[in-house]
Image: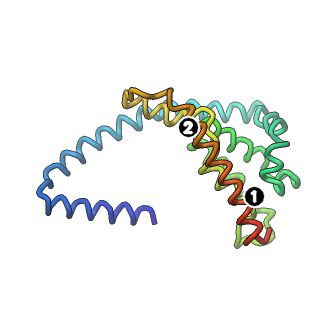
Amino acid sequence: MLGKCFGVISCISILYSFFVGTASNISEAIISSASKSVSLVISLMGSMALWNGILNVLKDCGVIKKLSNLLKPILKLVFPSSFKNDIATEEITACISANLLGISNAATPLALSAIKKMNERNPDKSSATADMIMLAVLGCSCFNFLPTTILAIRNAFSAEITYQLIVPIWICSGMCMILGILLCRILGKLYGKN
């Protein structure tokens, strides 16, 4: 769906450039954007590899299990069914931890693993449980304590304002997380089965 939207936007933009007479700018933009995207990917690979490696080491050392026990009282409120039945608690904790560190690339495989484990015990395989939906929502709107990806992108492009964005990011991501949790709870009560 998203690919179709971008395709339509691109087609409209190209057609518009022909009508306005700026079609030559498109080829220049494509070439410059391609080189910029390659340099951005290379600069982000280092930080992503570092944080993915740190998360894997923490998981292998048992730190994630200890963090799970530490966050259990809070996560029990957010994921009541999973923590009550001890389903995918390590994956959920690792996913939330990765999102807290702002490395959603590392959080995505952990969230998929957690949802797969939750679905194994789901009696109705055709629909998601409340905890699955909550994990998907928090994957998109979790509090970013350390927004590493945003900082890495801004550093790669030599932005004037980089670290001053941390407090506004805390405010926005915190409000998004609270709103996401509230909406999941309210809509779950109204429309949910489990």
Q: Residues within 10 Å of mark 2 (few under 14, many from 20)?
A: some
Q: Is residue 33 above or below residue 39?
A: below
Q: Mark 1 to mark 2: distance in Å?
A: 25 Å
Instruction: Give the number of the disc on residue 131.
Output: 1
Q: Residue at x 14, y 53 (%)?
A: 22
Instruction: Give the number of the disc on residue 73.
Output: none
Kind of residue at disc 1: Asp
User: For this rendering, which residue is in front, 174 or 152?
Assistant: 174
Spot occupied by residue 188 in the image (x, y as percentages of width and height): 74, 65
**Left or right: where 120 falls relative to 135:** right
**Left or right: where 15 falls relative to 95:** left
Spot occupied by residue 187 in the image (x, y as percentages of width and height): 71, 66
Where residue 73 sits, quadrant-wise, is top right
**Left or right: where 55 falls relative to 33:** right
Instruction: Give the number of the disc on residue 169.
Output: 2
Front tag of 1 and 2: 2
Dot placed on the residue nearer the N-terminal end, 1 or 2: 1
State which quarter of the image contains the C terminus: bottom right
